[in-house]
Amino acid sequence: MMKKQTVLSFSLGLLLSFLYSTTTFAQLSPASAPLKPPQPTPTPPAEAPNQPLVPSLPQSPSDATPDTAAVDIVGILRQAKSFNILIRLMKTTQLINQLNAQLLTTKSGGITILAPDDSAFSELKAGFLNSLSDGQKLELLQFHVLSDYVSSSNFDTLTNPVRTLAGAKPGKVELNVISYGGSVNISTGEVNTTISGIVYTDKHLAIYKVGKVLLPMDFFTVAKAPAKAPSLAPESSAKAPKSDKEKSMSPDSSESSEINSTNNTSGTVKINHGKLLSLVFGLLILIALSS
């Protein structure tokens, strides 16, 4: 009986000591830090989009066309209004066919059209367009088309002179583009104007409105009123008398004067000799008769 009590007491003591040691160890061990919620990875700020240098016109057509090859340039200009003269010239010179073919075959790049409206054409000299040949009209329109696509925010990246469909003629067909102060200035050497708005733009085609018709330098004589040619004085029927110096330098005049003077002298001598002979014969006859 005593052994059972001793074993029970010993077992109870071991249990109490085990519980006490477990509690003490839990108090001495450092508490685990609470788990922090995962922090989101900071994303870099998105780059600000390039601000266009040219504002969009209020009547500009929608540029949501997915494929430039299906774009109708004439339809865009007609929808934008006030480009009737430009449309007519594009059709008569068949430039519109060239532009459509270029858009169909282009895989990169594109074209940029600088479009003067009807009011810009009305500022030209009266009869100017009619005075141009078909080739000159085509060259004039090609001078308004850049060979590459230029977005409204990239005019400051162009290198002057800017290449156009009119080709390279140094000093005659040159287009210079300068962007400053949020505006784009265009100069041909004869005309200075600015781009006033966006008519249409997508990936390969851009159409911008310009304030004046861009006249190249080789059209300068056509653009200005031709100067009157100096009238030639009619030749007089009678020759002007020669100066004394010319008379002295002319051998013909001196020789002719000498011949005339000689002839006059010989004639006088002949007349005097005849008179003398007649007088001598008359005296001789009188002497013979008197004797």
Image (cartoon, rainbow, N blue to C red):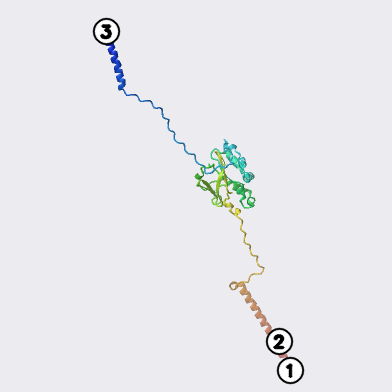
* Residue 85 higher or lower than 272, as above or below: above
Instruction: Tell me the quadrant of the picture where the C terminus can be found.
Output: bottom right
* Marks 1 and 3, how far apart at CA: 237 Å
**Residue 220 drawn at (x, y percent):** 58, 53
Whether residue 228 sits left or right of residue 153 in the image: it is: right
Asked if the residue under mark 2 is in contact with the one under mark 1, i.e. CB atoms within 8 Å, the reply is no
Judging by the rendered image, the residue that carries numbered circle 1 is: 290
Type of residue at label 2? Ser
Which residue is the extreme one toward the bottom? 291
Residue flagged by tag 3: what amino acid is it? Answer: Gln
72 vs 21, left or right, is: right
Give 154 or 237, whichever is nearer the viewer: 154
Circle 3 residue: 5
**Residue 165 makes an appearance in the image:** no
Q: Residue at x 25, y 6 (%)?
A: 3
Closer-to-camera residue (116/110): 116
Question: Residue 178's spot in the image, x, y percent?
Answer: 51, 48
Residue behind mark 2: 278
Assign a secondary structure to mark 3.
helix
